[in-house]
Amino acid sequence: MIESRHERRFVHLVLVGASVIALYPFVSIVLLALNPPGKRVSGFTIPSTISFENFTLAWQRGGFAQALFSSAVVAVTVVAASVAFSILAGYAFATMRFPLRNTLFVILLAGLMLPYEALIVPLYFDFRSLGLLDSRWAVILPQIGFSVSFGTFWMRTAFWAQSGGSLVEAAQLDGANTWDILRRVLLPVSGPAIMSLSALLFLFAWNDFLLALVLLPQNEAAQTAPLALSFFAGLRRGGEPSTIAAAALLVAFPVLIVYIVMQRRFIQGITTGATKG
Amino acid sequence: MEPSGPGDRSPRGRANRPPRADRAAPRGPAGRVQPVAYLYLLPAFAFFAVFAVAPLVHAFKLSFYEWNGITDQSWVGLDNYVTVFTDPKVRAALWNSVILIVFYAVLPISVALAVVGLMARVRIRGRTAFRAVLFVPTILPLTVVAVAWRWVYAPDGPLNFGLDLIGLDFVSRAWLGDFTFALPSMGMVGTWVTFGLVFVLFAAGVQKIPPELYESARLDGAGIIREFFAVTLPELRGEITVAMILTVTAALRNFDLVFVMTRGGPGTNTEVPSMFIYRSVFQIREIGLGAAIGVILMLELLAVNLAVLWYRRRGDLSA
């Protein structure tokens, strides 16, 4: 590659600048939260003494123990069910021949374009008449329904990549049934794809706000973490910026952990998944 | 029902195909029909039908009724849709969501293209680290993003502090409470969120461009600008399509940021369609109107997605 030193330096400067902008808002609430509560903070102030009191305050006042637990229950259930159903459906689409195969796939794929903002009104009234409003099921069930489109598409691509080899054919010739082929042949080599899918779906489920806001309107015990955060941030009375900042960090923490652990896989997943779509 | 295209192949034809083609073009499976497939599809389709398709049908139905959520529903035909397009508040919300497309899609895509265009020319040290860092805004919960930016934009927050510091104190203001700047300020948060996603897509795409293309462009004497338009931009067409779809969708669906940062204010300055949908259930109690806005929103997204895909396909044919 022909490259001038100036050009190289300039590109790196741009990237460093962009990284600072990408991280700063988050860093700014970290700095804010580490101040002792009640201290008047403004601008770029870096806390002189580090205090975790805001975190304890937020934890107690905002009911975050309950909310984080609730979010975990919702996210884990959604991920487990969606991934399982997506594996089954993706497997059928990738390896089997049956009438209406393409039609069914297109119908499921159309779900990717469906904004659930448009479904939130009927879902509210449907769950109300079923008596499921304010229960965790009210957010879990629709999220599974929305996730299987993406998941099936994802797993079909993954199984395609695997079944391109002769493993599946060999197993078929051996007379293995479809269930054995999935379990013994395909699943053992699809770990990475399943992990990526789980991580992405976890992220979507954890970050969901609108469903929780509309479908869990009154039950504090079932509130998810983003919902608790929005209520906490909306409270003007106890709502000191530094305590709200601490609350936001509590909500972001699990996602950041998953991201840091799975970072490479995430980005790979996004790029390959998106460009194949 | 016949499987389409290359899927319809005899087992023998399959075995003879070179393995490379096998990977390059995914195809439908060959062999005999396996009815057991429906059993595998059942759970996914059951959930999809009950929690996505059925509510969609219900939304259509509700959009033709006037209903306060409690008493009887009364059929009003297209009245709710007429309201969507004539009520100044709803129209303002729809218009705002269109403006947000500039911030969520156009701006990040242009900036990311410029950055990636530069990156294509040099070896980047720490490429993966930059990627990982720039992607962070995309993975954070939007409620957290909203809290962080509310602080950045606060009257005594970092942005105003920084402006004062460099002598631009006449610029500083309560950004989210300002009638002129509230919407652009909100929009910039959208730019911040989607930039990482777009950048990561483009950076991966640019790495797949064969270096020969750049070499021959340079042999032809192409400068940085021509190289960008002759090689980088056309080669990234697929990634740009995906980026458009994802970011425009995010712009039109925007709810979390508005709810936590401004609740649509000041006045109706940052009002968006999804806020109205929420209000229709919990505040103004006009369920039919909320359903109608939802249907319009869905059609809008469908139209945008199809337009982008159609444009892409047309571009492919002419290329």
Image (tube, helix red, strand yellow):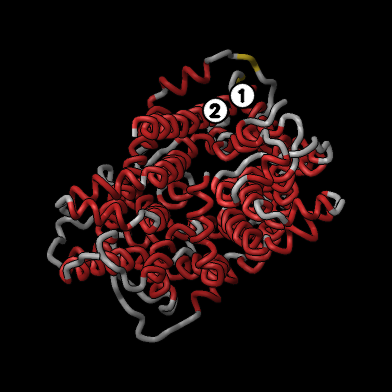
The chain letter for the residue carrying disc 1 is B
Residue A202 horizontal/vertical position (percent)? 61, 59
Mark found first going from the N terminus, 1 or 2: 1
Residue A34 horizontal/vertical position (percent)? 43, 78
- Horizontal relation, residue B102 to residue A240: left or right: left
- With respect to residue A274, does B98 lie above or below? above
- With respect to residue A54, does B232 lie above or below? above
Residues A208 and A161: in front is A161
Going by the numbered disc 1, the residue's amino acid type is: Phe
Q: Please, what secondary structure does the residue beneath circle 1 have? A: helix
- Horizontal relation, residue B304 to residue A227: left or right: left
Q: Residue at x 56, y 51 (%)?
A: B20
The quarter of the displayed image where residue A58 is located: bottom right
Residue on which the image places disc 2: B295
- With respect to residue A68, does B257 lie above or below? above
Residue on which the image places disc 1: B60
Going by the numbered disc 2, the residue's amino acid type is: Val
Q: Residue at x 38, y 63 (%)?
A: B134
Q: Please, what secondary structure does the residue beneath circle 2 have? A: helix
Q: Residue at x 60, y 44 (%)?
A: B26
**Residue A267 shows up from this direction:** yes
Q: Residues within 10 Å of mark 2 (few under 14, many from 20)?
A: many
Residues B184 and B245: in front is B245
Q: Are marks 1 and 2 in contact (CB under 8 Å)?
A: yes
- With respect to residue B79, does B212 lie above or below? below
Residue B172 horizontal/vertical position (percent)? 21, 57
Residues B253 and B146: in front is B253
Q: Residue at x 17, y 68 (%)?
A: A4
